[in-house]
Image (spheres, rainbow, N blue to C red):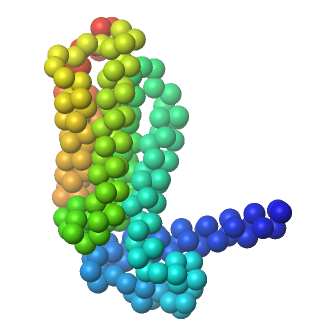
Amino acid sequence: MIEYFIFELKMADKKTIIIEATISAIAKYGLNKTNAQVIAKELKMAQSSIFYHFPQQQQLFDSLIEHIAKVNGTVVKDLLAKVNARNNFEKICQYIKGNLQWAISHRDHVTVLLYSLADGSYNEKFSKDITKILKTAEDKFYFYLVSGIAEGEFSVNGNLRSLAKLINQSVNGSVVTYFHLHNDWDLDTYMHELTLHLKEIIHLKNDKE
């Protein structure tokens, strides 16, 4: 039983390596020019090794967005656990920061998402998975907003769902901005300025800053 678990773990690790190589290849060559041959060359392995883990090339491509979402979720979750946010406003800010840190440390992942958004017709599953990712993030902001109001931490003028969508769109825009200005972009400075802007629309009841 233990031997089988170790075998399965090794297989999962190899799948992850192949998926990451595919993401890197797409970031380098684009969606349309990336195939099993290109990926095998990047990994310096036979194509048969790739097809052993992904019998069809489409199965490999279909797993990309799910993998990216999983990595993103891990990065954000680790940051939230590390900082131990005291309230829902801090959770909003740290959730934003976690997503931006993920973008900085996983540039190829974001490139794949941007390529997919730019050419949604390439893969219908890509489009659906990306839409799901964006909706999940929006729902998280909405949850923090609702919780903050329910717990008496702050008040908000206007529709909470619309505000959650606005914050989410701002984060997405920040990720794209980073791609254009990544050499001159200071995350801490950006987060400080963003926090001040958020306080203009989220009215904290015990804000001493």
Looking at this view, is 204 or 8 the one in front?
A: 8
Q: Residue at x 47, y 35 (%)?
A: 80
Q: Residue at x 83, y 63 (%)?
A: 1
Q: Quadrant of the C terminus?
A: top left
Picture coordinates of residue 121, whole percent (x, y)? 21, 69
| Residue 100 in sight from this viewpoint | no
Looking at this view, is 19 or 131 the one in front?
A: 131
Q: Residue at x 22, y 65 (%)?
A: 120
Give the left or right position of residue 137, taking residue 174 as reference: right
Image: 72 above or below 67: above
Looking at this view, is 100 or 144 the one in front?
A: 144
| Residue 66 in sight from this viewpoint | yes
Picture coordinates of residue 24, whole percent (x, y)? 39, 73
Question: How many labels were placed on the picture?
Answer: 0
Give the left or right position of residue 166, taking residue 89 as reference: left
Give the left or right position of residue 20, taking residue 158 as reference: right
Looking at this view, is 58 or 19 the one in front?
A: 58
Image: 91 above or below 78: above
Picture coordinates of residue 201, whole percent (x, y)? 18, 21
Q: Residue at x 52, y 78 (%)?
A: 54
Res 144 → quadrant: top left
Picture coordinates of residue 25, whole percent (x, y)? 37, 77
Res 182 → quadrant: bottom left
